[in-house]
Amino acid sequence: ADMAMYHTKENGGNNYTFFEHHMNARVVQKPSIETDLQLALKRQEFVLYYQPKINLHSGAIVGVEALIRWRHPQRGLILPEQFVRIAEDCGLIVSIGEWVLREACKQAKSWQDAGLSFTPVAVNISAAQFELTGFLESLADILEDTGLEPRYLEFELTESVLMQNTDTTAFMLKALKVIGIQLAVDDFGTGFSSLSCLKHFPIDTLKIDQSFIHDITQATGYLDDAALVIAVIGLGKSLNFRVIAEGVETHEQLEFLLGQGCREGQGYYFSRPVTEKKMLDLLKTGRTKPF
Ligand code: C2E
Ligand code: MG
Ligand code: MG
Ligand code: MG
């Protein structure tokens, strides 16, 4: 049988190509993954999974993050690490991102209409998407069409967005804030954003990157991850940011975070990202399992 596979050149980047392998491994067809992604959008092969954000004390669901997956007809479920970078590099992230935003807003509104959840839905926004003129207009259209109040929408931006540190970035972030959209820095601590970014941009939340949470109970490197995490929690406290720990996988990590006064977390310990249907069940309960 034919097997479809993506190959990446060792130098990474966007050199992904689509091969059709036969028994003799002869390459018959080689359209680019860009074409493939474009078709995927048209054929509605993208789907959103949702992962809850948890109040670490009560176990209550305090938010929901939308995470894209590609339901490939041959290859099954493909994770974003396999295609988001490529979509960013070829510009397709703009239309994919628009789809994600619309879908997430639609979903959040329908949970609200069912009386289930009035927590914000968080959407990951790429720098390439954010920079584009037209982003605000498209956002306005989506909010109007779906009827979701902006205060129930949160954007997760990476430090690379903030680092651009331009007037445009500042203007955009301020505009989003004025509308009422919540702003979070994703993977905080892995990029090169500075304290001055935090000072000049209207950020609400810092999401501590999962790599720091992973070794929180072990000593590695020059500085313990534990010490770094404690510092970020302290930063949040003094500078008035909400702080959320990503990638909480164990009870020890939860205990540590609680002990240090971190109030919110997200991770496999509570729930993996789940389908819309499973998220509905979680929202009906209002909390996740370990609680
Ligand atoms: P992210 O926004 O930092 O999302 C967290 C990632 O960590 C998700 O991977 C999630 O499934 C995973 N995760 C959550 N809890 C745990 C845990 O306890 N342990 C471990 N090991 N992992 C955990 P996912 O869904 O594969 O997404 C990866 C990245 O792809 C995201 O990182 C985000 O940067 C990007 N991404 C996902 N969806 C979108 C999207 O709609 N648009 C854009 N632009 N980027 C997206
Ligand atoms: Mg995120
Ligand atoms: Mg993250
Ligand atoms: Mg990440």
Image: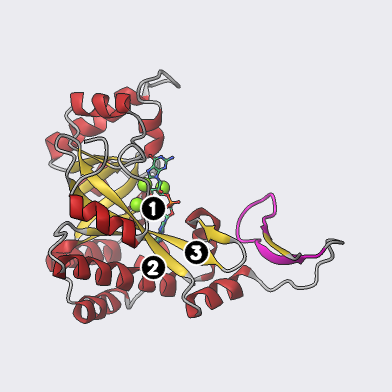
- Residue 12 at x, y percent in the picture: 63, 52
Q: Give the crowd class for mark 3: few <14, some 14-19, many >=20 residues within 10 Å.
A: many
Q: Quadrant of the N terminus?
A: bottom right
Work out whether 290 lies above or below 116: above
For the residues labelled 3 and 2, the Cα–Cα distance comes to: 19 Å
Q: Amino acid at mark 2?
A: Gln
* Residue nearer the viewer, 230 or 162: 230
Mark nearest the camera among 3 and 1 is 3
Residue at x 68% of width, y 60% of height: 5
Pointer 3 with pointer 1, Cβ within 8 A: no
**Location of mark 2 (residue):** 129
SS class of the residue under badge 1? helix
For the residues labelled 3 and 1, the Cα–Cα distance comes to: 25 Å
Left or right of 237 in this view: 68: right
Checking the image for residue 108, the label placed there is: none
**Location of mark 1 (residue):** 160
Checking the image for residue 70, the label placed there is: 3
Pointer 2 with pointer 1, Cβ within 8 A: no
SS class of the residue under badge 3? strand
